[in-house]
Image: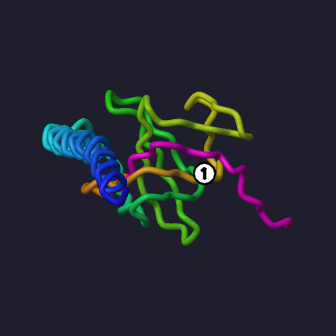
Amino acid sequence: MLRQVRNGLLFGFGFWLAPLLLAMVLTGVGLAAGVASAPERSASIPTASAAPVAEGTAPRQFAAQGTIARIGRPMPEGRLLVVHDPQNRAYRVLMTADTIIKKNGKRVKPAALAVDDLIVGVGERLPNGVFLARAINVVGQPVTPAE
C-alpha cells in the first residue's frame, strides 16, 4: 500500500512538475529577449531639450504637480507645458499623443487645458530635466485669497 501511494505521488509530481518548469524557463527566456530588444523610451523625444524654455528640472522623478503657467505650441514630439510647482519653481512637462488627460473625471483633449489649471501628472523625468507625462489630471484652479 505504501509503495502504491509513493508511486502515485511521484507520478503526480512528475506529471505536473515537468510542464510547469518548462513553461517557467520559456517565460524567462521570452522576457529576457524582450527586454534586450526593447528600444530606449526617451530616444523618441530628441528635441524636447532643444525647446526654447529655460526652466529647471522637474522636482520629482515620477510625479508632477503645479499650476500651468504657459502652454507651448505643438511640436512633433508633443506639446510643452511650463508648470510652476507649489514652491513657485518652473519646470517643463511634455504631453505626447499618448498622454491621457482627465478633467472633472472625464477624458479630454489637450485643448481643454488652460493657463492657471492646477494639474497632477504621472510619468517620468527624462535625463534632460523635462517631465514626460503619461497621464495628467486637472484638479481645478488654484484658490486665490479674497482681496
Screen quadrant of the N terminus = bottom left
Q: Which residues are magenta?
A: 131-147
Q: Is 134 a magenta residue? A: yes
Q: Quadrant of residue 143?
A: bottom right
Viewer-closest of 34 and 92: 34
Viewer-closest of 134 and 25: 25
Toward the front, the furthest residue is 1
- Residue drawn at 39 percent across, 47 percent down: 132
One can see residue 40 in this view: no
Q: Label 1 belongs to which residue?
A: 119
- Residue drawn at 36 percent across, 62 percent down: 57
Give the percent coordinates (x, y) of residue 133.
Answer: 45, 45
Toward the bottom, the furthest residue is 87
- Residue drawn at 65 percent across, 48 percent down: 117
Q: Is residue 125 left or right of residue 100?
A: left
- Classify 55 as above or below 43: below
- Classify 4 as above or below 26: below
Q: Residues within 10 Å of mark 1 (few under 14, many from 20)?
A: many
Q: Report the label total.
A: 1
Viewer-closest of 135 and 22: 22
Q: Secondary structure at mark 1?
A: strand
- Residue drawn at 48 percent across, 58 percent down: 63
Give the percent coordinates (x, y) of residue 43.
Answer: 20, 40
Q: Is residue 39 left or right of residue 104?
A: left
One can see residue 128 in this view: yes
Screen quadrant of the C terminus = bottom right
Q: Is 48 a magenta residue? A: no
Q: Is residue 36 left or right of residue 137?
A: left
Q: Amino acid at mark 1?
A: Ile
